[in-house]
Image (cartoon, helix red, strand yellow):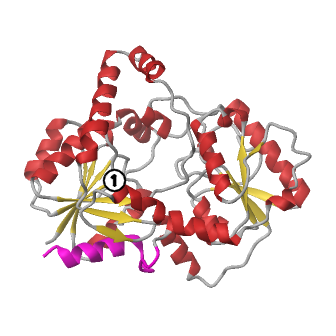
Amino acid sequence: MKKIVYLVEQPLDERNYGRFGIQTWIDKKWDVEIWDFTPWVHPRVWQDFIQSGRKLKKFSGYFPVASKKELKQRLFSSKEFKYFIDLTGENYRLLWTKILLTQKGVTRVVCATGSIPEPVCEKKSLIPRLKKVFATGTINSIKWMANLFFRKLVAPFMRPGLMVVSGEKSVPSVHNAHNILKAHNLDYDIYLKLKSLKDTSIEGYAVFIDQNYCFHSDFIFEGRPSCVTPKKYFPAVCDCLRKISNDLGVDFCIAAHPRSTYESGVLDYFEGIPIKYGRTAELLRDCKFVVCHDSTAIQLAVLFGKPLIFLTTGELAASFEGQSIVAFASEFGKSAINVERDLHNVDWKKELDIDLEKYAEYKKKYIKTDGSPELPFWEIVADHIEENVN
């Protein structure tokens, strides 16, 4: 049986099982293995996931890797395979694994499908950053230096055998790839599926795309505090949503971030505004307009032709995330509205204007490569590899 191996660094729950296209390979009679490096590379994230009560999507090919010893067991006990799909970053342990696999003649497949507008950031001195790193202790400092070394000096020479691209902005990242496969990003799969359904009625509500800024695991990954505090963020955002609701005569619902756990908490962070889980795409398809920060789900609003309003806060504006929001808004000829300033002079109706040319350009730059098949993403990848595996 043909075999494909995934390298991942986030727990394999039901959502990731679907996003990673595992069932696509199984349906095509491939043997699939998932090597999940979260326990080894991000132990705190792994611990938080287990303690939260969330469930792993276990199957015969799922292998959490918690140590170098367990990795070696995988490398030497696994049957021969010709391709591995790299969904990981540039941690030195992960890069070491990729080097071992490529030395064995296994083709590395990289998916350059997450391109988004990049903020213009000022270059900061390395000295303050080094002081912060060294203040975390010797062990953390050594890990940081090792990751920096591998990311700057080793990763650039790790040429992928196959690079899957989505949109013009992902193409510059493939200059050193052996082969390029044109496709689209994963949200376009959702769009294709929902577009085929008959019910496309627009309902009388607006959607705020939650990004779980206050509690997101990415901040754990990166070893830094959240860019916002719940005490300031939620009241300011909720006040603004109520202002928009009153001025435009429309009710709001919150499209909860898939990793959020608001329902299990005691506090009502969104102050009575209904929170919807696991239905972001459907909510965006059927709503009147969308209020957001810099979520990748914005591309679904673009595909469904929904008006966009961009919000920021004082805390966000002072962070990288705030600069990212500005970059997203500028793609559509808009500005980010600071919810902590006077909102009485904001013309919310004008904010709902759509520049169709900018929407089309955004799709071309970030969502779908011209001429790529109108097929699910993993079918495009699997079909290409099947043609070349023999």
Q: Quadrant of residue 248?
A: bottom right
Q: Nearer the viewer, residue 256 or 297?
A: 297
Circle 1 crowding by C-alpha within 10 Å: few under 14, some 14–19, many from 20: some
User: At 27% across and 71% down in the image, what residue appears?
Assistant: 26
Residue 84 visible within the image: yes
What percent of the width, then of the height, locates residue 231? Answer: 71, 30
Direction from residue 377 to residue 103 in the image, left or right: left
Q: How many marks?
A: 1
User: At 31% across and 26% down in the image, what residue appears?
Assistant: 145
| The stretch drawn in magenta includes residue 387 | yes
What percent of the width, then of the height, locates residue 263? Answer: 62, 46
Q: Quadrant of residue 3?
A: bottom left
Amino acid of disc 1: Leu
Q: Which residues are magenta?
A: 370-390
What percent of the width, then of the height, locates residue 1? Answer: 13, 72
Q: Is residue 14 above or below residue 45?
A: below
Name the residue that disc number 1 marks.
Answer: 87
Q: Nearer the viewer, residue 331 or 67?
A: 331
Direction from residue 166 to residue 335 in the image, left or right: right
Looking at the rendered structure, the secondary structure element under dot 1 is loop
Q: Quadrant of residue 318?
A: top right
| The stretch drawn in magenta includes residue 138 | no
Residue 286 visible within the image: no
What percent of the width, then of the height, locates residue 129? Answer: 45, 22
User: At 8% across and 49% down in the image, what residue appears?
Assistant: 76
